Image (spheres, rainbow, N blue to C red):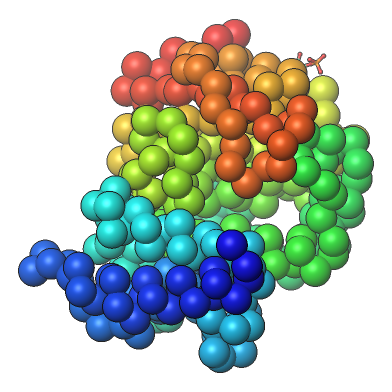
Amino acid sequence: MSEAARRASWRDLVERRLPEAARPGWPVRLDHCFARILLDHACGGPWRDHVRPPAYATLPLDQLEAAIALGEAVLAGHADLALLNRRSLAWRGKVAAAAVPESLEDGDLILRRWRPEDTAPFAALNADAAVMAHFPRPRTEAESVAEAGRFDRRFVADGFGPWALAQGGRFIGCAGAMRILQPLPFPGGDRPGTTVELAWRLAREAWGRGFATRAARLALDDLAGRCGIRAVVAYTAAGNARSRAVMERLGMAPAGTFPHPAVPEGPLRDHVLYRLDCADREDAA
Ligand SMILES: CC(C)(COP(=O)(O)OP(=O)(O)OC[C@H]1O[C@@H](n2cnc3c(N)ncnc32)[C@H](O)[C@@H]1OP(=O)(O)O)[C@@H](O)C(=O)NCCC(=O)NCCS
């Protein structure tokens, strides 16, 4: 389908199909409210902070596709529209943001909210081909700045997110949890908003010292306690042995494979999925 046709199908989705499908239990029924919720999620924050109106014309196509996929999940009854609406309103300061501790600590390893000075070292690790070997490509500086902002805004919306990691006073990467908000082809992943994934990414010089595993354990304690999250998943490209080893050290169980829809055809597309029930967490040594 052409780009113009995709942009037209977005307009049909928010201006006609979603308003027509609105049910009594839905928190919104007007076209601009559906557009707000879906566009905010495609941008990871208030969409007007990212693109100029009209969004149907100016939003990059990959983000518009993400907004369409989420809207289709809402229409199919697979996404929790009330949760998505609350997240969007929290970003806009219309409902109270979740209370979040300033940091979680394990000795010299600190998990904390993101700071402006983190963006330069974060951009450097995201530009490192070794760190990004299992991602489709390294990130540009602008993409890294945007990603750090999206990560931190997850704390506002959900009360948890990928923490910035500092060790010995230096930023070394990130680790934490994210609600899965784009439909993914595995049980739970196909219901955007309901499933929480764990993720980690460290600068190359911080590998091999247990920081990712220790950070994930701290994040898991916080998720299971303060946040009341009962189960998590983690996934990575099948060839990412280091990331799989972190999942196994955490006691996560392999739960099959799936083709990641956002990864182009090729050796990185096949992903392995792991699951952990927080109630019967039993960390491996
Ligand atoms: C995935 C990634 C975070 C794993 O890093 P890592 O350093 O291998 O994992 P950990 O920080 O848990 O460290 C484990 C290593 O430290 C050692 N270690 C030392 N102290 C340890 C401790 N207290 N606990 C656990 N391991 C410890 C382990 O023996 C292991 O050694 P090894 O490198 O010889 O296997 C890292 O490779 C990375 O950032 N990759 C790029 C980004 C990426 O692919 N992210 C995942 C995408 S889904």
Q: Position of residue 126 (x, y in %)?
A: 82, 50
Residue in view at x 25 percent, y 63 percent: 82
Q: Residue furthest left?
A: 24
Quadrant in which residue 75 is drawn: bottom left
State whether residue 188 is above or below residue 152. Answer: above
State whether residue 234 is above or below residue 10. Answer: above
Q: Position of residue 194 (x, y in %)?
A: 34, 44
99 or 237: nearer the eye? 237
Q: Does residue 154 appear left or right of residue 269 in this picture?
A: left
239 or 232: nearer the eye? 239
Q: Position of residue 10 (x, y in %)?
A: 46, 72
- Residue 117 makes an appearance in the image: no
Q: Does residue 159 appear left or right of residue 74 in this picture?
A: right
- Residue 65 makes an appearance in the image: yes
Tally of numbered tags: 0
Q: Residue furthest top?
A: 285
**In what quadrant does ligand 1 lie?**
top right
Q: Does residue 272 appear left or right of residue 93 in this picture?
A: right
Residue in view at x 85 percent, y 61 percent: 140
Q: Looking at the figure, which quarter contains the N terminus?
A: bottom right
Residue in view at x 45 percent, y 52 percent: 181
Q: Looking at the figure, which quarter contains the C terminus?
A: top right
Residue in view at x 76 percent, y 32 percent: 266
Q: Residue furthest bottom?
A: 53
Quadrant in which residue 201 is drawn: top right
Q: Position of residue 122 (x, y in %)?
A: 80, 55
